[in-house]
Image (cartoon, rainbow, N blue to C red):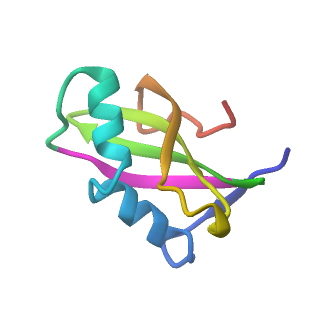
Amino acid sequence: MAMAEHRSDSWAWQVLLLAQSGYSVKPQLEEKEGKTFDVFTAVEFKTQVVAGTNFFIKVHVGNDEFMHLRVFRSLPHDNKPLSLHSYQSSKTKHDELAFF
């Protein structure tokens, strides 16, 4: 499936700001990783429309460390919070953000 790349002026950027604010995604990742992140800043993202939307997000987590997150937003009528579907650690600033 094709993914769309977005810049910070996109409507979807609001979802990312919500995600990095700790609304639901950051705590989910911290629980899975067993640690807290003092730095958690979305720097790039792509979307994939499915029965909802997958957001593939490159997140700076401090120093030269980055993680790629796959976050799912269900359809509005489902009324569910954002969910961390999967993630990849040990990424760099220059690693391409791709479907996983």
Percent of width and height locating residue 66:
37, 34
Residue 1 sits in quarter:
top right
Residue lying farthest to the left in this orientation: 38
Residue lying farthest to the right in this orientation: 1
Residue at 41% in and 23% down: 89
Do we see residue 9 in this rendering?
A: yes
Is residue 46 shown above or below 18? above
Is residue 91 shown above or below 77? above
Q: Which residues are magenta?
A: 39-47
23 left or right of 63 in image: right
Residue at 45% in and 72% down: 14
54 left or right of 86 in image: right
Residue 52 sits in quarter:
bottom right
Percent of width and height locating residue 88:
49, 25
User: Is the C terminus in the top left, top right, bottom left or bottom right quadrant?
Assistant: top right
Percent of width and height locating residue 86:
53, 30
Tell me how many marks there are.
0
Q: Is residue 40 magenta?
A: yes
93 left or right of 12 in image: left
Do we see residue 65 in this rendering?
A: no
Q: Is residue 51 magenta?
A: no
Residue lying farthest to the front in this orientation: 78
Front one among 64 and 42 = 42
Residue at 49% in and 54% down: 44
Residue at 51% in and 79% down: 9
Q: Main secondary structure of the magenta part?
A: strand
Percent of width and height locating residue 23:
31, 57
